[in-house]
Amino acid sequence: MAKTVHTVAVVGAGKIGELVLSGLLRSGWPVDRLLATARRPSRAEDLTARYGVRVVDNLTAVAEAEVLAVAVKPQDAAALLDDIGPKVPADKLVISLCAGLPTTFFARRLSEGTPVVRVMTNTPALVDQAMTAISAGAHATGEHLALAEEMFSPLGATVRVPESQQDAVTALSGSGPAYFYLLVEAMIDAGILLGLPRQVAHELIVQTAIGSAVMLRDSGEHPVKLREAVTSPAGTTISAIRELEKHGVRAALLAALEAARDRARELATQAD
Ligand SMILES: NC(=O)c1ccc[n+]([C@@H]2O[C@H](COP(=O)([O-])OP(=O)(O)OC[C@H]3O[C@@H](n4cnc5c(N)ncnc54)[C@H](OP(=O)(O)O)[C@@H]3O)[C@@H](O)[C@H]2O)c1
């Protein structure tokens, strides 16, 4: 399938929907092949003003687009699908960006045989550094997965995972940016505690985060190796690491990600 033949409608263009729209535009997706829907008129005006994209109602999106990228909050998905589900012909591709919702949630509300692809992306899509995990629902073919990859690869990296792993993906990379921002925020505070001006602390730690991330990606080394290279005997780093271990940072991360995974499951139950 050549990308220019597909009209994509972002249904519920909020934060994540906007990331998808702006990413597709940056990648050269023609604006006349993009549609968006919004609940509030002011949001619709805003999207048109910023991206030149046509904002339509949900039923027009269903009628005109070949691909419906659903980006509403999980708790709004049932109401949306009650409205549009019966009107979606089975030859449209539905791509869900909703955390937690299994493709069966959509299948129950769509015509029999409608292909559904579940996608979990993250906010670094804004700078084309997203991590997007893609899974096929019951009726999605390799061609549908390839089309989803075509849409999301300009926004960063993509990976195919079995749908059973998507709640874990949500906990890890979907919410992941927030954990890094929290760490950076805490380290800036630590810099201030040590007497550095806020701006200097910010600059030091942001560049350290970028440098460490690029090394992790490009060296192919295990993080333990990279950490060992900074941890000299009786040095400063090991003193800090002793404190991190004493305060259970590793255990806290394991528990935190388990909580995020459980919350993804809970969202699915509540959305039904
Ligand atoms: N934020 C993240 O980092 C992240 C990461 C990965 C996945 N996700 C997933 O992405 C989805 C969207 O999250 P978000 O943070 O982008 O939420 P959001 O900013 O609230 O966006 C959802 C948008 O959908 C609109 N909407 C709701 N019902 C609608 C309907 N029936 N018709 C048309 N528009 C409708 C909302 O309108 P109103 O403005 O009127 O509410 C809102 O603008 C969620 O399912 C979330 O799980 C988010």
Image (tube, rainbow, N blue to C red):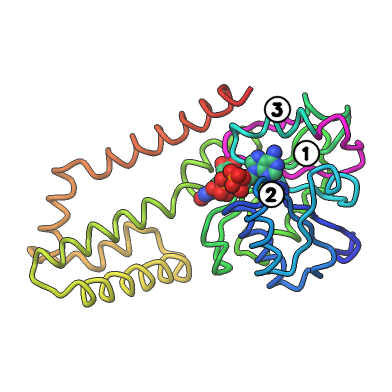
Neighbourhood count class around disc 1 (C-alpha, 10 Å): few under 14, some 14–19, many 20 upward: many
At which x and y percent is residue 128?
58, 68
Q: Magenta stretch containing residue 120, yes or no?
A: no
Q: Mark 3 or mark 1: which comes first in sequence?
A: 3
Closer to us: 14 or 128: 14
**Total numbered labels:** 3
Q: Which residues are magenta?
A: 84-106
Neighbourhood count class around disc 2 (C-alpha, 10 Å): few under 14, some 14–19, many 20 upward: many
Of tags 2 and 3, which is closer to the observer?
2
How far apart are the alpha carbons under marks 2 and 1?
Answer: 21 Å
Neighbourhood count class around disc 3 (C-alpha, 10 Å): few under 14, some 14–19, many 20 upward: some
Residue situated furthest front in the rendering: 41
Q: Amino acid at mark 2?
A: Ala
At 68% from the left and 28% from the top, the residue drawn is: 78
Q: Amino acid at mark 1?
A: Val
Return the residue at label 3: 105
Q: Is residue 31 above or below residue 146?
A: below
